[in-house]
Image: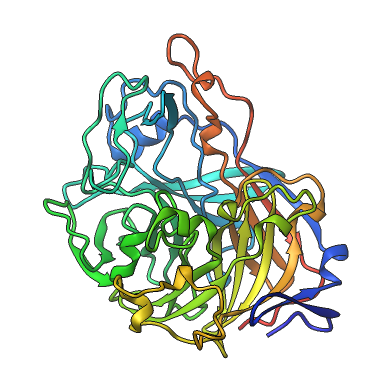
């Protein structure tokens, strides 16, 4: 599947890997509208969705972080309506000698799904649901496991906060035809089935990931190898085929398989196809990341900086994928038709040596990776916000992307001496882009 009538050229980027570049895409795509999110206080939204009194002091922090993903259903949503979701919430990393302490200035926070309309340059909130367990309590954005996750701290790292087995760092989002949601999480990594009102109906986790005392059912349906996800690099993306029959998600960055140094040097990622009703994967493919030092003209992007943050299926064999650093983002067409399905093979086993992430010659390993076609360099369109993460298809000639503004929090200077928010003006933006040639979509 290709852009119609697009001129193409191919370059070999690694042994056995070919990337096709659509030459016309770089010069004729254009931004047609940018819509920004006005200030909506998080405390007001949490008190409305979880109940009055949930947050006593919201520190003046506005709703943000919702650009982690962007979803639009072409069949049921108006062309200017989108679904977005905030991640684990406002957080600041403090340096304490050689130790980094992850602090949460709003511990009452829980991830929120929002329904928005883009009109006249403004994103208007239509609806919001807080993600919660069977008890009605918010799941929070705290991590689950002291053996695998950073310790959560209070605002100034004066004391620790409790781990929460229910907590999720929510990233990928789709809304199913029946109105329920599917959400990916970076911590486990996991996929959650979420009711229309925000209740977690089940969370699908890797085999061997044990959680007890959760406020929702947990099922171990995913490959054990995912336990080796690099810290803060679990599942960032999620997409669903137009008929709603299949989910696709990608590990944000190569697994720490067997260690973090391997993850930071590797270019071998993994894309999964998953049954949206059972959480059971049906296929797994190798996705080869671009070469970091040649990702842009500066030559300053390290391999470890590259991430996959959005996956949008056009059909069961063809995906749109956003691969990016914090500063530079690119859109690829990814075709799976001739790729090797490695699900259930030795590459999914923790004892395999060398691991997939250590393998530099995929051809010798008898693996055909997914085929990639570069469709668009977002930075070629002019000034773009940092951290383009969410992406969705509006129609055959129009896509939209969104940025993660991290709640407009950069570090401790984002708060005054009284602990009240003082942002820099980084806003959430949804940017609609006209493509140079139409996509072939159902």
Q: Quadrant of the N terminus?
A: bottom right
Residue found at x 27% / y 54%: 199
Position of residue 238 measured from the top left corner of the image (x, y, whole percent): 47, 65
Residue 150, quarter of the rendered image = top left
Q: Report x, y in % for residue 180.
A: 36, 64
The reply, left or right, for residue 376 in relation to residue 122 is right
Q: Relative to residue 306, is residue 130 depicted above or below?
A: above
Residue 259 seen in the figure: yes
* Rendered residue at 41%/73% (across/down): 354
Q: Quadrant of the C terminus?
A: bottom right
Frontmost residue, 8 versus 421:
8
Q: How many dots with numbers?
A: 0
From this viewpoint, which residue is outermost toward the top?
Answer: 417
Q: Nearer the viewer, residue 6 or 307?
A: 307
Residue 186 x %, y %: 39, 54
Place of residue 35 in the rendered image (x, y in percent of width and height, measured from the top left): 68, 45
Q: Is residue 17 above or below residue 382?
A: below
How is the structure coloured here?
rainbow
The residue positioned 73% from the left and 59% from the top of the image is: 294
Q: Is residue 72 visible?
A: no
């Amino acid at each position: 599947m290709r852009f119609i009538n697009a001129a193409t050229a191919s370059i070999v980027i690694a042994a056995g890997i070919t990337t096709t570049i659509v030459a016309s895409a770089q010069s004729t795509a254009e931004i047609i509208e940018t819509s920004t999110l006005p200030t909506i206080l998080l405390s007001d939204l949490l008190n409305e969705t979880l109940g009055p009194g949930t947050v006593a002091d919201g520190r003046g922090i506005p709703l943000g972080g919702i650009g982690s993903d962007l979803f639009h259903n072409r069949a049921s949503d108006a062309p200017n309506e989108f679904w977005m979701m905030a991640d684990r919430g406002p957080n600041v990393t403090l340096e304490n000698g050689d130790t980094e302490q992850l602090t949460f200035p709003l511990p009452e926070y829980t991830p929120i799904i929002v329904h928005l309309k883009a009109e006249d340059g403004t994103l208007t909130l239509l609806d919001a649901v807080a993600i919660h367990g069977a008890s009605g309590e918010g799941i929070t954005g705290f991590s689950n496991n002291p053996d695998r996750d950073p310790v959560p701290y209070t605002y100034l790292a004066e004391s620790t906060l409790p781990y929460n087995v229910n907590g999720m760092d929510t990233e990928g989002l789709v809304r199913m035809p029946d109105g329920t949601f599917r959400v990916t999480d970076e911590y486990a990594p996991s996929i959650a089935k979420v009711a229309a009102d925000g209740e977690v109906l089940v969370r699908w986790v890797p085999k061997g990931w044990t959680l007890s005392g959760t406020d929702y059912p947990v099922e171990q349906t995913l490959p054990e190898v995912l336990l080796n996800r690099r810290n803060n690099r679990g599942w960032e993306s999620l997409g669903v085929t137009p008929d709603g029959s299949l989910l696709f998600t990608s590990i944000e960055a190569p697994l720490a398989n067997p260690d973090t140094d391997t993850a930071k040097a590797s270019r071998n990622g993994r894309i999964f196809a998953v049954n949206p009703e059972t959480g059971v994967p049906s296929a797994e493919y190798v996705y080869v990341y671009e070469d970091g030092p040649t990702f842009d003209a500066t030559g300053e992007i390290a391999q470890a900086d590259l991430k996959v943050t959005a996956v949008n299926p056009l059909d069961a064999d063809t995906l749109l994928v956003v691969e990016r650093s914090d500063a530079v983002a690119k859109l690829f067409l990814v075709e799976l038709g001739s790729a090797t399905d490695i699900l259930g093979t030795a590459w999914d086993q923790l004892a395999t040596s060398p691991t997939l992430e250590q393998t530099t010659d995929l051809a010798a390993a008898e693996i055909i990776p997914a085929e990639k076609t570069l469709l668009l360099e977002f930075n070629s369109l002019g000034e773009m916000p940092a951290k383009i993460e969410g992406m969705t298809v509006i129609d055959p000639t129009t896509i939209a992307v969104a940025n993660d503004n991290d709640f407009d929090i950069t570090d401790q200077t984002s708060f005054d001496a009284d602990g009240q928010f003082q942002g820099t003006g980084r806003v959430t933006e949804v940017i609609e882009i006209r493509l140079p040639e139409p996509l072939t979509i159902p």
